[in-house]
Image (cartoon, helix red, strand yellow):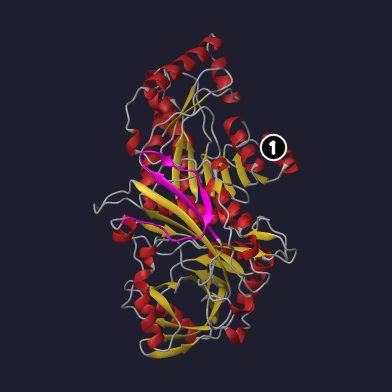
Amino acid sequence: MHVCTRPRTGHRHMVSLFDSGAALRRFTIQAPTMSLRYHNKVAVVTGGSKGIGRGIVKVFVENGAKVVFCARGGAAGEALEAELNKAGPGSCTFVSCDISKEEDIKRLISVTVERHGHIDCLVNNAGWHPPHKPTDDTTAEEFRDLLNLNLVSYFLASKFALPHLRQRQGNIINVSSLVGTIGQRDAAPYVATKGAIISMTKAMAVDESRFNVRVNCISPGNVMTPLWEELAGQTPDAAAAIKAGENAQALHARLVQALPFSISSLRFASSFKVMREIINRNAACKPKPDPSSLVFGKQFSDHMLTINWSEKDGWEAPQIKPFQNLSLHPACSALHYSIELFEGMKAFRGVDNHIRLFRPMLNMERMHRSADRSCLPLFDKGELLECIRKLVEVDQEWVPYSQDASLYIRPTFIGTEPSLGVSRAGKAMIFVIVGPVGPYFATGSFNPVSLLADPSFVRAWRGGVGAYKMGGNYGPTISVQNEAVKRGCQQVLWLYGEQEEITEVGTMNLFIYWTNNKGERELVTPPLDGIILPGVTRQSLLDLARTWGEFKVTERTMGMKELLSALDAGRIMEVFGAGTACVVCPVGSLLYKGKTYQIPTMANGPDLAKRFYKELTDIQYGRKPSDWAPLVV
């Protein structure tokens, strides 16, 4: 997409952005807004000590991020590090490195992972604009050196960061230049590097979309940085050089804005207009059930939230109204073609009687990705979360006065197009229902479950939609679950492929705590490779374990052969599932090809599973302060 922003000079500066999450789109805004939440996220910024890079680092820190930035000179970087760490609320670490050297780039990424355990965002910003020269006065060596600095460094930083970004479904932001699109006099090598960055971004975006890694490119025009002032100062008339650059940008802006496009074909993350929200309270509220008698998913509160959308009118005002049945056309696309998705969240009444959510923005981000994959209209994640918060506030007395129960929140998004055509829905609805819940499993909140592992059943496959929370992923599992019960098991261990890769446990993410073949204690969970749902609890356990730093934490594939071999060797300590509904659920046994394997989870405490459970529930119920648990009431 192309974004026009208005700088202080009054001229429009054009920023070109290729968005990997959707088709190429064009629109104009008057001021940029930050749509991503980077609080507690880890960002790497190259060339971060001055100019645009310095501004990027500063904004990240102001938004609570943990930033590792590099530059060649030490003094400016160290000064910025001290300044921003004092200001907060985020933090930053300066690493002195030469971005044109592969080993230095590799060290930058290694330092980041060693310090913070992961990477959420990479900003490739480092670069240089040489003095203006005609092409025939530029040597091949000068061109190669510039390519190495401006382009190859972006490639190498991305190459080394991508394994970590894939684990977090993170993003890469490549800083190019407007001249990569419109050209510049006597600057062919520089223009070539910046144009190549744009092309490389598009290619990487296509490659990484299957891993849910976003790769974007911003192309600023003339920004008054020390580099631009230095470059203009090398010309006979610096003011004229700056004016010429601004004129070129203004011309390009007019050309781009004149390009025709069809608004009806675009899906914008449009506003619900939360301030227009309508609340119609139920006059006849139901009695609240005893928390000790709750069964998962059977009781519902007095109110619900609905938000309708149409291609013609966009999003309507959100409505909180008495809980009631939905009225749907018999040809509704959700009923025929499963154009629908959902989320699962909880609200908790704490020991201080305050009500908290748990990392709710992760749910909103996942729901947004699922909507994009389903060709449903996009939405403002922050506004939907605010609507949900208001619903919980209205029904706050339905949040159980118990630390063994909670209020389950089910946001659902359906296509309501009244047509039997297999196509993108022209009408849709988000609705949210809530209800009090106790333990998910009948065996209780922390008793071990038995698993059936049968390779003849497959839950998801690469290239499919297993990484999205769609109803179509769950309905087909019911018959397999029934088969597991017939064979004396409570849940299914889902396998995939010829190597019988272990993927998920029922509707939970899977964790294995073992001693690996190097003698190291290690926590292993399958990677986010398109088969695995990126669970909020999964991410929380990984974040906790990496913060503790007491054992190795790995996201990788593991097959049944490797698991059984380790089990026979006595190297498996604990196996457990993790999810919103159950939090943490230990595994006690495994039925595979007619043989039952006992898993020593309970014999080992299970110390780690219990520690995870306590850590998360302490945060959820307010026993431990954390920014993971924002207050509702």
**Residue 583 visible to an observer of this rendering:** yes
Residue 321 in percent (x, y) is at 53, 54
- Count every numbered label the image shows and give the total: 1
* Picture layout, residue 545 above or below residue 379: below
Q: Which residue is most to the left?
A: 421
The residue at 51%/76% (across/down) is: 517
Q: Quadrant of the N terminus?
A: top left
Which portion, as a residue range, is magenta?
303-329
> Is 210 displayed left or right of 442 in the figure?
left
Residue 350 in percent (x, y) is at 70, 65
Residue 567 in percent (x, y) is at 49, 84
* Picture layout, residue 409 above or below residue 139: below
Residue 625 in percent (x, y) is at 72, 60
Residue type, label 1: Leu
How many other residues sit within 10 Å of disc 1, few (<14), some (14-19) or many (≥20)? many
SS class, disc 1: helix
Q: Which residue is most to the front?
A: 283
User: Where does label 1 land, which residue?
Assistant: 80
> Is 519 displayed left or right of 327 in the figure?
right
* Residue 211 on the magenta segment: no
* Picture layout, residue 225 above or below residue 216: above
> Is 488 displayed left or right of 265 in the figure?
right
* Picture layout, residue 340 above or below residue 24: below
The residue at 57%/45% (across/down) is: 44
Q: Quadrant of the C terminus?
A: bottom right
